Image (cartoon, rainbow, N blue to C red):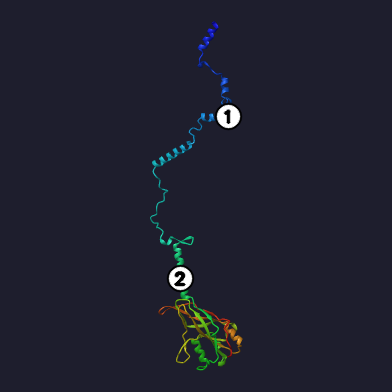
Amino acid sequence: MAIDRTIQTKRSGATMDSLKVPDNINEKLSHNAYKGSKTNAAAEEIFSSNRYSKQTRFGAADNKYEGSEHRARVRRDDPIDDSFIPKPDPNKKAPDLLHQGVKVGSAYVERKKVIIWITVALVLLICALLFLPPLMNSTTQDTTVDFNRNIFQKMGMTEFKTYALSNYSVYNQEAFSSEKNENYRVIEMTVHVQNSSPFQVVIPQYKALYVPTMYEDKVCYVTSAKRAATKDGEGKVVGDVIEGFQGKDVTIELMINVADMTEEELDECVTEMVLSTVNAKKKIAKNVYVPCLPAVLFISNAVTVQLDP
């Protein structure tokens, strides 16, 4: 009975506070093997040290929001620095109509450039209408040789040469070398002149612009066949007038010294010549004329002339 009381006394005096786990056992219990799997142990270690406090799904967003709110509050409290805000230039003018864009096709072009292009086009058109010459081409059916003309009927060679120098476009004075009428041929060539401008064209005279070298001493003169009657009966050359946007057949007269020439040589001399107008001008208003470029005529090879009838 005494033993039982001793045991009972020990049991009644023992409490939970008096129990102590040995140190060696506590070290073993702290090992990962007693905490479950290694994954759970790592997770427990992370969250127990508060390394990622508040890093929930919205944790990072909360931090950034708080920082943005702080920066916004600082901006409200600080004065606004407007040194980097561009200020309007009081001297700068708004773009005028000349610098505005105009759509041309698929691109925009500055209105000023469009106006320049239009102005240049108009100037070129006006210059073309004012200064470009009419077109001339020779016809074949009405080119004739005046075999019966007597150039010495009213004056001798010296007088005729002087008259020609005053009234015709003399090409070579040396061509007036023969005193015989039969050594000269007067050729009347029909030429069509087309005026493509709205202005009247006045052609006072024509001349030989080019003559083959071997026939340069054979061509006496070139002139307009249109003459006005004079007291001496020879007539003064008055030239031709072509109205605006119209065409007209005119007659050009050539005189050639045919001494020692064959018919083939005469034909070659004529068909290889180049003629042009002299002092042509356009009438743009009453008594107002402007000079225009000379019109050029390349005589057609189809033109035929005969030495004898």
Camera-nearest residue between 117 and 300: 300
Q: Residues within 10 Å of mark 1 (few under 14, many from 20)?
A: few
- The kind of residue tagged 1 is Lys
Q: Measuring from the top left, give residue 25's x and y in whole percent.
A: 57, 20
Instruction: Identify the image quadrant of the N terminus.
Output: top right
Question: Residue 40: in sight, yes or no?
Answer: yes
Cα separation, mark 2 vs mark 1, equals 96 Å
| Circle 2 residue | 123
Q: Which residue is mark 1?
A: 38
Above/below status of 186 relative to 132: below
Q: Quadrant of residue 288?
A: bottom left
Quadrant of the frame with the C terminus: bottom right
In percent of width and height, residue 272 lies at 58, 82
Percent from the top left, x then y, of residue 126? 45, 72
Q: Position of residue 300 (x, y in %)?
A: 56, 81
Q: Is residue 1 above or below residue 250?
A: above
Residue depicted at 45% across the width and 66% down the height = 116
Image mark count: 2
- Looking at this rendering, what residue extends furthest in the top direction? 1
